[in-house]
Amino acid sequence: MKEYAFRIDCHGETRQVTKHWQFCIGSGHAALAQRADYLEQLKTVHDELGIQRVRFHGIFNDDMNVCIRLRDHLPAPQASRTKLYDFYQIGRVYDHLLDIGVRPFVELSFMPAALASGRKTVFHYRGNVTLPKKMAEWQNFITAFARFLINRYGREEVRSWFFEVWNEPDLPCFFKGSMSDYYRLYAATVRALKSVDSQLTVGGPATTKSGHIPEFLDFCRREDVPVDFVSTHQYPTDALGHEINRERVRQLKKLGKEPKDRSLRALLQPVFDNAAPFTPELKGYMTREAERAKREAGGLPLYYTEWSISSNCVAAVHDTPRCAAFLVKTVLDHQGIVDGSSYWTFSDIFEELFFFTDPFCGGFGLLTVDGIKKPSFWAFRMLARLPDVRYCLPDTISDDVGIAAFRADDGGLAVMLYAQSFQAEEQTYQVRLKLENAPHFSSVRLERIGRSSGDPAAIWREMGCPSQLSARELEQLKRDSQPEVRHLDVGNVKGQRAVDITLRDDEVVFLEFQC
C-alpha cells in the first residue's frame, strides 16, 4: 500500500478560479433536442450540475429542413434555381434550450444539401461534410440565419452566444477539403455573421488533438479575419478511424457467427473498445496539451469544445469510476489554463453510428438512455459544490493520487482526492490530510465514488446484464447506485488536525469541512 501525506494551511495562499467545466456540455445532433427525454436530462444537468450551454452537431442538417430547393418539390423549369431558407425547427430547438435555462453554443455545421458542392456525408443522419458549391450563397444563408436569431431572441441575447465554425475540419470524415479550404470557409462565415452584428462572438478551428492553432491564427492575422476565441478538442486516446489491426480483423470475422439476438453494442464493443491502451504515460497528457494550446492561443480565450476519456462511442470505460476519476483530475488540472470546456456528452440519448439502447452501452453520456446517473455524473455534482477560491498546493499532476483544496466563504474547507495509476493491478493508497491553522469544524462529510458506490453499471452486471430494464430494476439501479456518504472525526496528529483516508485506483473522495 502506497502512503501519501498532504498539508493544507488554512491561512495559506489562495487564488480565485472559475468552474470552466460548467461553461458547456456536449450532445449528439440538433434534431435530438426535440425529444422530451433528451430535454428532461438536459434540465437535470443544468439544475444539478450548473451547466450553462450545450453544443451539438448538425444544426444545418437536412433533417432540420433549413434550406429547400424548389426543384426537388416542383418539377418546373423556373424552379431550378430557387432556394428557400426555413429556420423554424432551429427556433423550436433553441426555444426548448432557453426554456430550460441553457444557452446554445452554436456549432455551424453541416452543409445543407441544397448548398453543398458534393454528396459526402458522415454518420447515419447523413451530415453533409463538403464545402458550399458557391461561397457567396453560403454567406447569404449565414446572414439570413444570424438575422433570424436576432429577430427571434434579441440582439443582446444572441451576443451572449458563441458561434463555432464547423467541427473537426482536420479529419476527412468531417470535412472534405484541406485546412486551407477550412480557413477560407471560416473567413466567409465569420464575415457573414459580423456583417449582421459585429459583436457576435465567433471562433474556431474546432480541431482534434489541440491541432492547427498557430496556422489558423496566422491565417486570420494575415487575411485580417476576425477571431474571438480558439476552440479545439482533446482525448487521451483517439479511437476515431478505428485502426484495423490483426486482433480487430479476427473480431470482425466472428461477427457473422454471432447470435442474431445480440445487441449492436455487444457486437461492436469487443472490436472497437479502446479501454486497454490507458498507460501511466497518459497521466498529465491532457494538461500538457492544454498548456501548449494556451500558449499557441496567445491572448485569446481557449475553449475545449469536446473532451472525454475516449472518443469511442461504445467504450465501456465511459460507464465506470475510472471515467469519473479521469474527469475530476482533468478539470481540476485545467483550472487556470482553460477558459471553458465542454465534456462530451451529457446523455447516452445520442446517435452517430446508431442509437444504442442497452442500459449500459459504453456511451459518452453522464446519464444513460434511461436517465441513470453514471459515476461521471456524480463527479460533476461534486465539482459543482466546490467554492471558487482554491488553495495553492504543490503540483500532483503526475502522481497516482491528486488533491485540490478550496476555501468556502464561511471559512469551511472543501477537498477533492482522486487516485488513478493506470496500472494493470489495482493500487491502494493510504492518504493522510494534515490541516494547519484550521478553524473549529462542526462536521466533516465524506462522499465517495468507487467500485462499491456510485457505480450503477456494476449493479447491472450483478443483475445479469438485462438487455432491457423493468420499472422495478430501473428504480433499484437509481436507488442503489448513489455515492457513499458518511461523516468523519477530525483527529490530532502531533498537534495537527488530521484525516486519514484509504483510496483505491479510480476512486474519487469529496470532503466538506463545515464550520
Image (cartoon, helix red, strand yellow):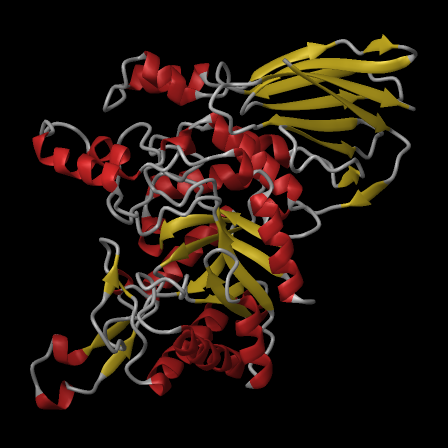
Where residue 437 appears, x then y in whole percent?
Answer: 92, 24
Residue 178, image quadrant: bottom left
- Does the rendering let one see residue 24? no
Where residue 181 appears, x then y in whole percent?
Answer: 39, 78
- Does the rendering let one see residue 349? yes
Which image quarter holds the C terminus?
top right
**Residue, x 51% and y 18% (percent of image)?**
426
Towards the viewer: 276 or 168: 276
Which residue is situated farthest in the bottom direction here? 78
Counting the numbered discs, the total is: 0
Residue 147, image quadrant: bottom left
Where residue 105 appears, x then y in whole percent?
Answer: 49, 58
Residue 393, image quadrant: top right
Q: Is residue 329 above or below residue 505?
A: below
Q: Is residue 511 above or below residue 318?
A: above
**Residue, x 67% and y 52% (percent of image)?**
337
Q: Is residue 192 above or below residue 32?
A: below
Which residue is situated farthest in the front direction here? 246
**Residue, x 42% and y 36% (percent of image)?**
277
**Residue, x 33% and y 17% (percent of image)?**
461
Towards the viewer: 503 or 452: 503
Where residue 125 appears, x then y in whole percent?
Answer: 24, 55
Q: Is residue 32 found left or right of 489 in the rendered image?
A: left
Which image quarter holds the N terminus?
top right
